[in-house]
Image (tube, coloured by chain):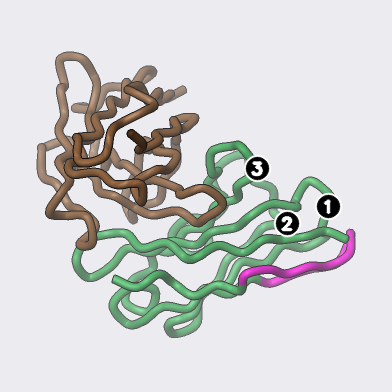
Chain colours: A brown, B green
């Protein structure tokens, strides 16, 4: 059973960089044709796709966030990471990591982690 | 990319059926058979209910079904049960190899 777990600071100051890591267990990031993704949900709002990294290292980002986002993978640790720079209060949200298979359906999700942007 | 359009809320009585729509464009919903549906209970992570328009993952009951016509996809839940009360989101692959979600629909089982 694949499991994903987000980790990182729950509080980030405005203008700084939000950094989160997703640790994958029960499977290897490098072993299959999966898309390792980040998705966020603002309080009381809907889901917003941030981006994904293919096991080969190719990345795709939401055009509205592309200038501030970097997703990377560390296959030796079976982890992938999110960096979002120049954050503002509008980036306060629950951040989920998830695995997508062919067709970009997200079949496994982390539990989510709340990141608050505040001074 | 614009969010897919879903009704903000729907409600129906237990035992009845409900259909939730998800409207996009030829660049997403209409262009690919890669529409997914998710169920989210408060405080929980979303759960995949339908993928590739009409396929159910293992463990999802056959009361949940999906379809698509043109640029609009639909999720139908039959025999509504109290535990079906949740938010439902659609998503689609796009021509840019990105993902777009719908705004979400809050289902109330009266």
Residue ID at (19%, 27%): A30
Q: How many marks?
A: 3
Residue ID at (50%, 56%): A46
Spot occupied by residue A108 in the image (x, y as percentages of width and height): 44, 36
Residue ID at (46%, 49%): A42
Give left or right: position of B28 versus B36: left
> Which residue is under mark 2?
B63
Q: Do marks 1 and 2 both belong to one polypeptide chain?
A: yes
- Residue sitting nearer the eye, A4 or B53: A4
- Residue sitting nearer the eye, A5 or B31: A5
Earlier-in-chain disc, 1 versus 3: 3
Spot occupied by residue A95 in the image (x, y as percentages of width and height): 39, 38
Q: Nearer the viewer, mark 1 or mark 3?
A: 3
Q: Which residues are magenta?
A: B8-19
Numbered circle sitting on residue B42: 3
Residue furthest top as drawn: A77
Earlier-in-chain disc, 3 versus 2: 3
Tell me if residue A101 comes above or below residue B13 in the rendering.
above
Quadrant of residue A85 within the rendered picture:
top left
Earlier-in-chain disc, 1 versus 2: 2
Local packing at callout 3 (Cα closer than 10 Å; few below 14, some 14-19, many 20+) is: few
Q: Do marks 1 and 3 both belong to one polypeptide chain?
A: yes
- Residue sitting nearer the eye, B37 or A97: A97
Q: Are marks 1 and 2 in contact (CB under 8 Å)?
A: yes
Spot occupied by residue A48 in the image (x, y as percentages of width and height): 39, 54
Numbered circle sitting on residue B81: 1
Subunit ID for the residue under disc 3: B
């Amino acid at each position: 059973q694949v499991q994903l777990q987000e980790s990182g600071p729950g509080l980030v100051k405005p203008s700084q960089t939000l950094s989160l890591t997703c640790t994958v267990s029960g499977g290897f990031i490098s072993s299959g044709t999966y898309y390792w993704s980040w998705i966020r949900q603002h309080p009381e709002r809907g889901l917003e796709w941030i981006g994904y990294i293919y096991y080969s290292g190719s990345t795709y980002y939401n055009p509205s966030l592309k200038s501030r986002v970097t997703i990377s993978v560390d296959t030796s640790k079976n982890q992938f990471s999110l960096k979002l720079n120049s954050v503002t209060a509008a980036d306060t949200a629950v951040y989920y990591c998830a695995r997508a298979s062919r067709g970009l359906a997200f079949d496994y999700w982390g539990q989510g982690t709340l990141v608050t942007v505040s001074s | 990319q614009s969010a897919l359009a879903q009704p903000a809320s729907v409600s129906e009585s237990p035992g009845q059926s409900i259909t939730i729509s998800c409207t996009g464009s030829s660049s997403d919903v209409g262009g690919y058979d890669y529409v997914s549906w998710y169920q989210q209970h408060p405080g929980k992570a979303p759960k995949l209910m339908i993928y590739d328009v009409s396929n159910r993952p293992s463990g999802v009951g056959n009361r949940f079904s999906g379809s698509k016509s043109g640029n609009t996809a639909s999720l139908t839940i039959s025999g509504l049960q109290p535990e079906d009360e949740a938010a439902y989101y659609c998503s689609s692959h796009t021509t840019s190899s990105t993902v777009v979600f719908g705004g979400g629909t809050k289902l109330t089982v009266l």
